[in-house]
Image (tube, rainbow, N blue to C red):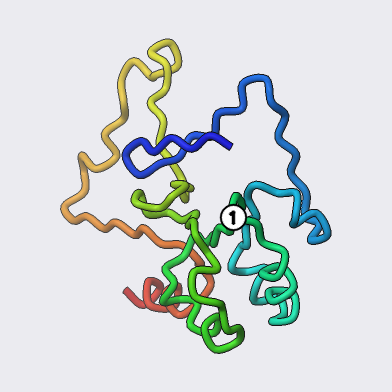
Amino acid sequence: MARNQIHGRVSLEMSDKKMQINLLLHDKGKSDLVIFHVRDILRSVTLEKIQQIHKYLSPRQRMAFLTHESIDNEADLKNRLSWSEGFFNWTVTYKRESDIFYSYGSYVLLPSAERPAKIPDYAAEKNQSVLWAVSNRGRARDKYVKNF
């Protein structure tokens, strides 16, 4: 697996090679990269599975920890499983300094042919502004905004 670090991102060069992705733990010894999504860990990964995987690790393998949330939101994870020091040697997160930058969302400029000739000014008649950038709606923050 080729690993090129570019501004905190990793590009995986595959050219004529084929990449196979599966969710089968029995292939763990053959994999170059094993990704653990934090939500899946909390739902279905046991300490026994982690110990089994760790037993068959090879030096060429990478164990990546994937999350879209701040680890502070995953406090239960530390309490549920005890990880060997250095078990995860890559991270896949929303942070640019991660080994693999996994954007939570992105903005792409439309090609000029698809852009409107004039962009409406929705704020022209407004005298106050509010911006609400939020994920995980449906919780206490929704109630707060309704009262606001």
Residue type of the residue flagged with mark 1: Pro
The answer to which of 144 and 36 lies nearer the viewer is 36
Residue 31 pos. (x, y %)? 71, 49
Tell me if 44 is positioned left or right of 38 in this view: right
Query: In terms of secondary structure, where does tag 1 sit?
Result: loop
Locate residue 51, reporting x and y percent: 69, 76
Tell me the residue at 74%/44% (across/down).
21
Q: Residues within 10 Å of mark 1 (few under 14, many from 20)?
A: few
Determine whether 117 is above or below 47 in the image.
Answer: above
Between residue 96 and residue 5, name the one nearer to us.
5
Q: Quadrant of residue 59?
A: bottom right
Locate residue 120 relative to residue 83 in the image: left or right. Answer: left
The residue sitting at 79% across, 61% down in the picture is: 25
**Residue 82, quarter of the rendered image:** bottom right
- Which residue appears at 40% of the width and 73% of the height? 146
- Res 8 quadrant in image: top left
Which residue is the site of mark 1? 59
